[in-house]
Image (spheres, rainbow, N blue to C red):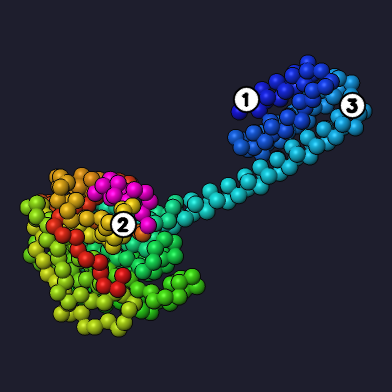
């Protein structure tokens, strides 16, 4: 911040001692211009005022106050300094408005996509979310955890057709319906039916049809994991990527024999017969993800080989595994992701006592191996 004021003194001294044939006074406009890029409006105005005062001092010292050239220099410097101060004032107001908008958006996004607890029920959780839009913390991918009325944890992970801010309305619709229904619906089919009903009823109101007139739908995967019955875990897949089950360093893709269509595509069929049970024992891990992970392309166009990469990483804990996946995924992409991407790693722990511990901000995780699952239908 001292540089603009040092320049004022330096230019003034050089102009005085350079003689009448060399006039350096017009260079004083550099001082307010430089200050505007480093400080606020008040300091910019001070630099401008000092630059004009220095120009007047130079003119008076050399005795040319009445010459048209010197008077033109003073007027021009005054006008330019005032213009710089005005532009800095406008920029400062816009920066304050943008800062306020960002803080409001961040708060809203955190409320919408609440960070999952690190521990919930008998589960340990690690998560990763990458938005395709810069400076946005949530887009078209979604996930949430909730405790059921009985001793079980319910999980949803989903993907809105589209990405970025335009997809937030649909994501919020599913998240709100899940958080409300997870405690009220006695069965997993009943919960999925509630999600489908909410989406069918409200999708047109929240979808961004102005900028995207195409079909709007949400793929999702809903799971129920009992605290004390490893063989009674259930899932219903609505057109989403199949989860991966990691057991004894081996990975199994949990395909749904009869997956349901994505939410919002058509009338919901009878879902009572569509529940897919699976065994989730202590020490096992579930990897849930969206297609933004498996469809992430390298600069050469290759898809990210999720399963193969996970097989080469240590699986000592969900956090460790997800850290390796996250770093490797960014290396594979070679830049910012082109689509929203979400990852959940869930491990059943020996403890069966339900408890919640807030998840530390910024933690990530992931697990897989074998062949990468195909993209879900219709995406």
Q: Tell me which label, 3 or 1, sits earlier in the chain.
A: 1
Frontmost residue, 236 versus 374: 374
Q: Is residue 44 left or right of residue 290?
A: right
Label annotation for residue 65: 3
Q: Can you tell which quarter of the image residue 251 is in?
A: bottom left
Q: Is residue 223 left or right of residue 84?
A: left
Q: Which quarter of the figure is the C terminus placed in?
A: bottom left
Q: Is residue 225 above or below residue 318?
A: below
Query: Judging from the image, what secondary structure is the residue with disc 2 in?
Result: loop
The span shown in magenta is 325-338
Query: Judging from the image, what secondary structure is the residue with disc 3 in?
Result: loop
Q: Tell me which label, 2 or 1, sits earlier in the chain.
A: 1
Frontmost residue, 349 versus 141: 141
Q: Can you tell which quarter of the image residue 107 is in?
A: bottom left
The residue to which callout 1 is attached is 2
Q: Give the number of callouts.
A: 3
Q: Is residue 368 above or below residue 17?
A: below
Question: Callout 3: 10 Å neighbours few (<14), some, many (20+)?
Answer: some
Q: Position of residue 3 (x, y in %)?
A: 63, 25
Query: Magenta stretch: residue 220 in it?
Result: no
């Amino acid at each position: 911040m001292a540089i603009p004021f040092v320049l004022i003194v330096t230019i003034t001294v050089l102009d005085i001692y350079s003689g009448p044939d060399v006039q350096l006074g017009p260079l004083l406009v550099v001082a307010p211009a430089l200050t505007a890029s480093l400080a606020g409006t008040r300091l910019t105005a001070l630099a401008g005022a000092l630059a004009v005062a220095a120009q007047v001092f130079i003119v008076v010292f050399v005795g040319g106050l009445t010459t048209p050239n010197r008077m033109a220099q003073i007027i021009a410097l005054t006008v330019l300094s005032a213009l710089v101060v005005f532009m800095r004032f406008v920029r400062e107001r816009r920066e304050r408005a943008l800062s306020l908008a960002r803080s409001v958006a961040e708060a809203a996004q955190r409320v919408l996509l609440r960070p999952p607890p690190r521990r919930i029920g008998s589960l340990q959780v690690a998560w990763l979310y990458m938005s395709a839009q810069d400076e946005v913390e949530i887009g078209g991918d979604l996930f949430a955890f909730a405790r059921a009325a009985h001793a079980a944890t319910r999980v949803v992970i989903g993907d809105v057709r589209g990405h970025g801010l335009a997809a937030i309305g649909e994501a919020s619709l599913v998240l709100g319906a899940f958080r409300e229904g997870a405690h009220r619906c006695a069965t997993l089919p009943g919960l999925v039916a509630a999600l489908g009903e909410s989406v069918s009823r409200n999708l047109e109101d929240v979808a961004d049809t102005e900028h995207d007139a195409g079909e709007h739908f949400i793929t999702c995967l809903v799971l129920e994991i009992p605290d004390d019955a490893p063989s009674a875990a259930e899932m219903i897949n609505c057109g989403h990527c199949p989860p991966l089950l990691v057991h004894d360093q081996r990975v199994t893709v949990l395909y749904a024999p009869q997956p349901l269509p994505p939410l919002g595509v058509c009338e919901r069929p009878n879902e009572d017969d569509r529940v897919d049970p699976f065994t989730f024992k202590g020490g096992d891990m579930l990897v849930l993800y969206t297609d933004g992970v498996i469809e992430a392309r390298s600069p050469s166009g290759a898809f990210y080989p999720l399963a193969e990469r996970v097989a080469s990483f240590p699986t000592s804990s969900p956090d460790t595994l997800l850290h390796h996946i996250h770093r490797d995924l960014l290396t594979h992409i070679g830049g910012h992701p082109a689509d929203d991407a979400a990852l959940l790693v869930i491990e059943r722990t020996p403890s069966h006592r339900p408890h919640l511990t807030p998840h530390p901000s910024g933690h990530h995780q992931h697990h897989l191996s074998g062949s990468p699952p195909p993209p879900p239908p219709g995406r």
